[in-house]
Image (cartoon, rainbow, N blue to C red):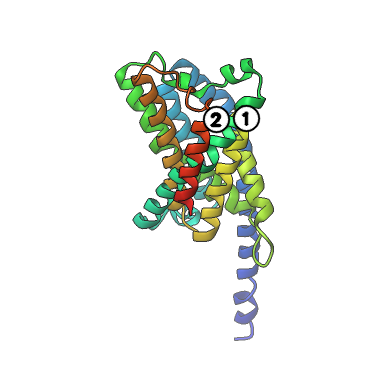
Amino acid sequence: MEDSAPSASPPPEPAARVRRTNRRTLALGGATLALALFMTVGGFAQFINPAFGIWFTELFVFLALGWVMLRYAGWRPAVFTGLMPVRRLPLLFGFLLGVANFFALVVPIQYAAQLIAPEWLTEMFDGSRLFEEQTTVELVLILTGVTVAAPLCEEFFFRGIFQKGLTPRPPASPTRTLVVSAVVFSAFHLDPVGFAARVELGLLFGWLYLRTGSLWPSIGAHAANNFVSSALFLAARAMGQDATDEQTDPRAVLALAALGWVGLM
């Protein structure tokens, strides 16, 4: 009995230390590796074919990489990140919140950024060009990629692995990690004009994840933002209008922001 007691008590402490170290290492190492793959393999795939490249980047750079890293470190990926169980009502709540947030904050922030940025920079990073000169099949792949694959895969990686891995345990405040994860999330998109708007989105997604411990609210909000922005562009194009006309009209921006704030309230 005396020989068995010492051997039974020490193991939990080393195991706990290893798991805590793994969370931070996964966050930092995963972000570094994901950035390298995103800038090389992912960038090349999107250059060759945007429709294929979006799906390839989301599935392999963000989802598969994160999944393999978690499994290799001994974690259950879906449980660790909060992807399981599936929660439909939080997903719906996140989607509705994402729609309101898009009009209340994303539209005015992006409008202000476009006013400040030089015209050549705004044109260089015009995301609406992604939809131009695409076949019907490619357009469908792009739309589903940005509204389904991107919210799921990016939230899995940036909130479920990166933010969670860096978030300190209570009673320490998670605020600094929330801000850092939002900035890194925005920086990955390589869009200086849309940087501030995506930081705000990262703060929203990260806040939802902190409050619920589930990825589904942030996935819903992420999907809503991408869906509404894509739908507005396609609607404007169908009416033969410039996709940026509505955003360059201050009255339209104020009206949309007011509508969004009503939704948020």
Residue 60 in picture, x, y percent from top left: 46, 34
Residue extending furthest top?
133
The residue beneath circle 2 is: 250
- Describe the element under mark 2 as helix, strand or loop: helix
Q: What residue is disc 1 on?
A: 113
Instruction: Say which label, 1 or 2, has the lower sequence index.
Output: 1
- Disc 2 marks which amino acid? Pro
Q: Is 80 or 194 nearer to us in this picture?
A: 194
- Where the N terminus falls, by quadrant? bottom right
Residue drawn where x is 51% and y is 43% of the image: 104
**Secondary element at tag 1:** helix
Q: Viewer-proximal residue, 13 or 132?
A: 132
Classify mark 1: residues with Cα within 10 Å, few (<14), some (14-19) or many (20+). some
Which amino acid type is marked by label 1? Ala
In the image as oriented, which residue stretches furthest toward the front? 251
Residue in the picture at 40% in, 36% down: 227
Give 199 or 137, whichever is nearer the viewer.
199
Q: In this view, does 175 lie above or below 16?
A: above
What percent of the width, then of the height, locates residue 42?
Answer: 51, 26
Left or right relative to 165: residue 79: left
Viewer-side residue, 224 vs 114:
114
